[in-house]
């Protein structure tokens, strides 16, 4: 059985949704970030990075959301969560998810975890002031150039969709004017109606 280590309101939600979409047999392990459980030796044995998500498989743990999503799509091909038979199309899926991981999530983190990059309070405050503009720029690119249709890749739902949904739930908290992102918000609302999303949110709230 797969075991997903997560914390509520983190990017681990994307992997959680994908596991449900895939029909996977899984169990959840919740970490309390307030109690810094992600830094305890027991968890660092699973993920030395001290972050979530981590997915424990029969062959060992995996980390980083794009890798976990690709693993789920490939392990459960019958769920058709990615265009596995088309190398170019699958690379496009990976490119989108890598952008969310390496650019969008990092921009978001500047507002809450500036201490990862600088020590001076005034520098951290400057990052926080910049947050709405930097995150807005990321999502305007998604809005106008990357979101192809009802789903990220167009007509077909893929592992890109739970990931975009997850990071889009952070928009208001980042001070972004969502009226500038109608297609992203429509996608978020469409995702919120999916049973897999409702189930994942309910499981993380319990």
Image (cartoon, rainbow, N blue to C red):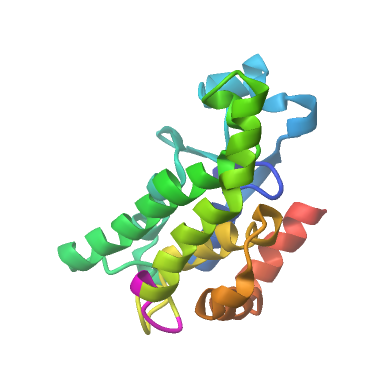
Q: Main secondary structure of the magenta part?
A: loop
Q: Is residue 23 visible?
A: no
Residue 191 position in % (x across, y down)? 59, 75
Residue 93 lies, with reference to residue 6, above or below; the image says below
Percent position (x, y) of residue 154? 36, 81
Picture layout, residue 171 above or below residue 42: below
Q: Is residue 148 magenta?
A: yes
Q: Is residue 165 positioned above or below 99 on the image?
A: below
Total residue callouts: 0
Residue at the extreme left? 87
Residue 10 belongs to the span the image colors magenta: no
Q: Identify the residue shown where x is 69% and y is 66%.
A: 199
Give the side of residue 4 with respect to residue 8, left or right: left
**Please, is residue 49 above or below residue 202 in the view?**
above
- Place of residue 64 in the rendered image (x, y in percent of width and height, measured from the top left): 44, 40
Identify which residue, 181 or 42, lies in the foreground.
181
Residue 3 placement: quadrant: top right
How far from the left and from the top, in percent, is residue 2?
Answer: 53, 45
Residue at the top extreme of this rendering: 41
Q: Quadrant of the N terminus?
A: top right
The residue under the point 40% across, 44% down is 102
Left or right: 203 in relation to 105: right
Give the residue at x 40% y 49%: 66
Is residue 135 among the parts visible in the rendering?
A: yes
Between 41 and 175, the one nearer to me in the picture = 175
Taking the spot 59% from the left edge, 73% from the top edge, the residue there is: 188
94 vs 117, nearest the viewer? 117
Q: Which residues are magenta?
A: 145-150
Nearer to the camera, 110 or 197: 110
């Amino acid at each position: 059985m797969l075991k997903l280590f997560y914390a509520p309101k983190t990017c681990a939600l994307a992997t959680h949704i994908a596991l449900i979409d895939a029909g996977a047999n899984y169990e959840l392990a919740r970490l309390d970030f307030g109690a810094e459980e992600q830094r305890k030796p027991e968890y660092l044995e699973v993920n030395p990075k001290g972050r979530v998500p981590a997915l424990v498989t029969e062959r060992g743990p995996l980390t980083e959301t794009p890798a976990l999503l690709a693993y789920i799509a490939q392990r459960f091909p019958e769920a058709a969560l990615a265009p596995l038979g088309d190398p170019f199309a699958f690379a496009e899926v990976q490119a989108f998810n890598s952008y969310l991981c390496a650019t969008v999530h990092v921009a978001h983190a500047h507002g809450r975890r500036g201490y990862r990059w600088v020590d001076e309070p005034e520098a951290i405050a400057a990052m926080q002031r910049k947050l709405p503009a930097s995150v807005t720029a990321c999502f305007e690119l998604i809005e106008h150039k990357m979101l192809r249709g009802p789903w990220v890749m167009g007509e077909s739902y893929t592992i890109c969709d739970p990931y975009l949904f997850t990071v889009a739930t952070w928009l208001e908290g980042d001070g972004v004017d969502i009226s500038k992102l109608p297609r992203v918000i429509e996608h978020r609302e469409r995702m919120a109606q999916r049973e897999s999303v409702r189930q994942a949110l309910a499981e993380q709230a319990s």
